[in-house]
Image (cartoon, rainbow, N blue to C red):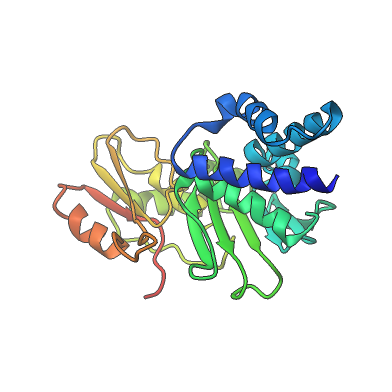
Amino acid sequence: MEPIEELAGALRERLIERARAGEALEEGVPEQVRALVEREAAPLDDSERAALCERVILLATGLGPLEPLLADPSVDEVMVNGPGAVFVERRGRLERTDVSFGSGADLMHTVERILAPLGRRVDEASPLCDARLSDGSRVNVVIPPLSLTGPCLTIRRFRRAGFSLRDLVGNATLTAEGADLLALAVAARASILVSGGTGSGKTTTLNALSGAIPGDERIVTIEDAAELKLRQRHVVRLEARPPNLEGRGEVTIRQLVRNALRMRPDRIIVGEVRGG
């Protein structure tokens, strides 16, 4: 099976390069893989070719061991601490799963599969990366030498339906009196700062507060990675941009706030303030 492993790696890299070039691989991957196998794996017999095709298709179009976790609607966050330790968050509780990767290289293949269609990559020169998937989920990657446990991958799932203040009352996050007070503060245009630890529900609370903004106001949201889900019709969403591989093109939250002041906003919502 060693020739299959070698060819799978070579074909996978070729498909990742195509993804970086912006090609939509999912639609034609089986045909592409079969054509590549016919051309480059002629010495293999039919069963070996079939095994090679199946392996490369999984590597090229799927996320390997993470697929069932990301398909589970109860999972809010997936945390991979190296190839042998995969955790999830469900309803605010962390759980270790029985999922694992065969090696650090297998985990890096999954990382590359996630980042390549986004035009992003990680390597020794740029060993960390923040990105947003097409469904709005946030991805963070840290690799050696910064990570001493091997490649680390964190995926924060995007929830399309946000919570309202009444929802927070219903699940005992807020009292009814507290929700009424916050709604009055929003209606009165008070400046509000939502503060808390990682995973404490800051974005959830900010989303709920935004529901008290009148529907006839112009709202500009500014985020490091888009997560807010406002229900109002007149919303302009701005997202900061990191520098490219050459260190150019960065647009910071500070720059976006200055620009938003020229956009005639009734409200400016800054999703996250860090490094201040």
Q: Where is 252 relative to 264, above or below? A: below
Q: In which quarter of the image is residue 107?
A: bottom right
Residue 79 in which image quadrant: bottom right
Q: Position of residue 139 (x, y in %)?
A: 55, 53
**Image coords of residue 219 (percent x, y):** 27, 44
Seen from the viewer's position, the closer of residues 204 and 213 is 204
Residue found 51% across the figure and 38% down from its top: 135
Q: Residue 74: x and y, percent?
A: 70, 41
Q: Which residue is drawn at 72% across and 54% down?
A: 106
- Residue 175 position, x and y percent, is 56, 53
- Residue farthest front in this picture: 43
Specify whether residue 66 is in view. Answer: no
Whether 249 is drawn above or below 207: the answer is below
Q: How many marks?
A: 0
* Picture residue at 61% right of the left edge, 75% below the top: 145
Residue 68 visible in the current orientation: yes
Compared across the picture, whether 152 is left or right of 25 comes to right
Residue in front for this viewpoint, 190 or 134? 134
Q: Quadrant of the N terminus?
A: top right
Quadrant of the rendering where the C terminus is positioned? bottom left
Residue 37, image quadrant: top right
Q: In this view, does 160 lie to the left or right of 238?
A: right
Looking at the image, residue 182 sits to the left or right of residue 111; the answer is left
